[in-house]
Image (cartoon, rainbow, N blue to C red):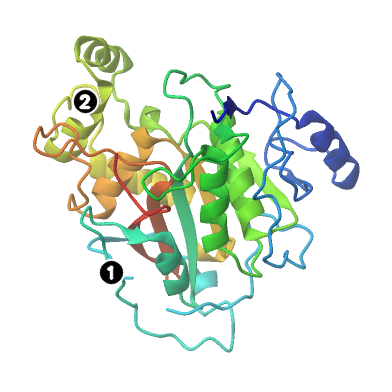
């Protein structure tokens, strides 16, 4: 019988070691972590993670040691069409390509699955030399019975056969997605203040082969961003059989609008103030590790409602799978395009 464990953490030692290499600071400081399978982000309940058979990454690590979020990368990648767009605040400093040798090409069209999602690898390849991208992504698999802040990603000590063609646990899922994002670019990361999102960012970074892990945390990337009346939301949460019905009903059909803000207005606000505020100030690539309750409304907004996460529809009952999300891609003229994606072979549960 295969044994499945939940990872809690071996990370205080790594954080201490990293603090000797980087200056002390607040949540936004950059830290370097060893690229090994038995290290995961810090937790007050430190345990040792069993050796990870996928911890040997063949992609070359980035030659850069650290990159702060406001510093752009000079690497160039090729040129996805999205059904919606928005314009971030204009900046006179962002009117020319970051790379003087960049030749602007047309936006490529990439295939979508039956849910309306592109593969994250295709989205990554589509980012043009005059664009920067933020991948907002749901965390990897966690224990279904545990949803608290300290609930970690799942991990199989001995990996069984894949489940529906997917890696069998949250650790391997995140590593697999990271391998799809492998390049010489230095990624930066933001995660919520949940252990599983921090671990997801860490293992995506490991899958990329990046030697450093520049990351920070934020409370805003969850359904809480959209709550207008928390008491009313709690009433609906308690009175329905599943809070997913509330979130999907609101995002698609404006139900429960007395508890939740206008989807378009609040999503544009978080994009323009936090996700992609201005081309010139952004890193070439960033990953935000979040939760399903944020990924669903963001996906509905990004696709003008065409992505099928209609959990409140008895004929559908789809919900964002682990490591699904939305790419927010901004060009040097501060024009934004959105591409909902799946990180694994399936995009809905």
Q: Is residue 280 above or below residue 256?
A: below
* Viewer-nearest residue: 21 or 50: 50
Disc 1 on helix, strand or loop? loop
Residue 65 is drawn in which quadrant?
A: bottom right
- Residue 223 place in picture, x, y as percent: 36, 30
Q: Is residue 253 left or right of residue 199?
A: left
Number of dots carrying numbers: 2
* Viewer-nearest residue: 282 or 44: 44
Q: Which residue appears farthest toward the right when viewing the image?
A: 20
* Viewer-nearest residue: 154 or 222: 154
Which residue is under mark 2?
246
Name the image quarter holding the N terminus: top right
Q: Is residue 183 left or right of residue 338?
A: right
Mark 2 Cα within 10 Å, few/some/many (few <14, many 20+)? Answer: many
Residue 277 visible? The answer is no
Instruction: Identify the residue at image location x=47%, y=19%.
Output: 146
Disc 2 on helix, strand or loop? helix
Q: CA distance from mark 1 to mark 2?
A: 30 Å
Q: Is residue 46 left or right of residue 309?
A: right
Q: Is residue 227 left or right of residue 274?
A: left
- Residue 52 place in picture, x, y as percent: 68, 43
Q: Which residue appears farthest toward the left when viewing the image?
A: 315
Q: Is residue 66 above or below residue 242?
A: below
Instruction: Identify the residue at image location x=85%, y=39%.
Output: 19
Query: Which sits earlier in the primary sequence, circle 1 or circle 2?
Result: 1
- Residue 43 place in picture, x, y as percent: 69, 25
Mark 1 Cα within 10 Å, few/some/many (few <14, many 20+)? Answer: few
Q: Is residue 223 above or below residue 328?
A: above
Which residue is under mark 1?
111
Residue 215 is drawn in which quadrant?
A: top right
Name the image quarter holding the C terminus: top left
């Amino acid at each position: 019988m295969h044994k499945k464990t939940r990872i809690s953490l071996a990370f205080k030692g790594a954080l201490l070691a990293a603090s000797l290499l980087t200056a002390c600071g607040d949540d936004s400081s950059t830290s370097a972590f060893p690229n090994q399978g038995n290290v995961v982000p810090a937790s007050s309940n430190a345990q040792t993670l069993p050796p990870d058979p996928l911890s040997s990454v063949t992609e070359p690590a980035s030659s850069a040691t650290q990159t702060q979020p406001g510093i752009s990368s000079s690497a160039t990648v090729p040129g996805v069409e999205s059904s919606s767009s928005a314009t971030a605040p204009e900046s006179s400093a962002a009117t020319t390509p970051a790379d003087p040798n960049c030749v602007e090409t047309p936006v490529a069209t990439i295939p979508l699955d039956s849910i309306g999602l592109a593969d994250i690898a295709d989205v990554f390849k589509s980012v043009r030399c005059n664009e920067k991208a933020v991948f907002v992504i749901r965390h990897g698999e966690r224990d279904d019975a545990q949803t608290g802040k300290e609930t970690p990603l799942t991990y199989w000590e001995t990996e069984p056969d894949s489940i529906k063609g997917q890696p069998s646990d949250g650790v391997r899922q995140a590593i697999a997605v990271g391998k799809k994002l492998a390049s010489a670019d230095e990624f930066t990361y933001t995660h919520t203040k949940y252990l599983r999102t921090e671990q997801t960012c860490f293992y995506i970074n490991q899958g990329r082969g990046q030697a450093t892990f520049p990351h920070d945390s934020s409370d805003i990337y969850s359904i809480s961003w959209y709550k207008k009346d928390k008491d009313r939301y709690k009433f609906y949460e308690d009175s329905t059989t599943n809070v997913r019905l509330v979130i999907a009903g609101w995002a698609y059909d404006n139900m429960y609008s007395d508890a939740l803000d206008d989807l378009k207005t609040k999503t544009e606000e978080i994009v323009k103030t936090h996700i992609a505020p201005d081309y010139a100030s952004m890193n070439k690539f960033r990953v935000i590790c979040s939760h399903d309750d944020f990924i669903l409304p963001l996906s509905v907004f990004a696709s003008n409602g065409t992505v099928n996460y209609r959990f409140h529809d008895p004929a559908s009952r789809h919900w964002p799978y682990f490591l699904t999300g939305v790419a927010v891609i901004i060009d040097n003229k501060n024009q934004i395009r959105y591409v909902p994606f799946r990180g694994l072979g399936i995009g809905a549960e």
